[in-house]
Image (spheres, rainbow, N blue to C red):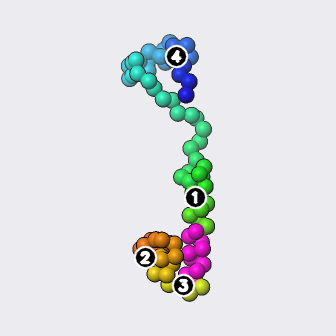
């Protein structure tokens, strides 16, 4: 990350206002882009959605929650939360 001097970028009135809160410290200014929901960037959201759909489908086809828990490496409670 490249640092920029606030004095070179900000108008004087804004710089003085910032100095009231933080002076001589490093300040991170986040990007203005809209934040993506959890798992969107990494693909985790799609992975778990697909997995949960498979679990529901297998349950409706007759698999027991205990068998699904064993197959997917999840607790029985986790399987029940997914299927109900």
Q: How far apart in space, not on screen, are marks 4 and 3 (Cα)? A: 62 Å
The answer to whether residue 74 is visible is yes
Kindly identify the residue that appears in the image at 55 percent across and 81 percent down: 59
Residue 71 in the image: above or below residue 47: below
Tally of marks:
4
Mark 1 to mark 4: distance in Å?
A: 39 Å
Residue, disc 3: 63
Q: Residue 76 carries which label?
A: 2
Residue 4 in picture, x, y percent from top left: 54, 19
Q: If you read the primary sequence from the N terminus, does the residue marked by circle 4 or circle 3 appear first?
A: 4
The residue carrying mark 1 is 45
Residue 36: x and y, percent?
A: 58, 47
| Real-space CA distance between mark 3 and mark 1, rounded to the nearest whole angstrom | 24 Å
Q: In which quarter of the image is the N terminus?
A: top right
Q: Name the residue under label 4.
A: 5
Say whether marks 2 and 4 touch (CB < 8 Å): no
Q: In this view, does 49 lie to the left or right of 13?
A: right
């Amino acid at each position: 990350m490249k640092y920029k001097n606030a004095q070179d970028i900000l108008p004087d009135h804004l710089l003085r206002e910032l100095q009231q809160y933080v002076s001589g410290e490093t300040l991170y200014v986040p990007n203005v882009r809209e934040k993506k929901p959890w798992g969107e960037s990494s693909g985790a959201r799609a992975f778990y959605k697909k997995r949960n759909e498979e679990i529901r489908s297998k349950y409706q086809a007759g698999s027991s929650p205990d068998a699904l828990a064993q197959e997917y490496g999840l607790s029985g409670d986790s399987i029940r939360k997914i299927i109900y």
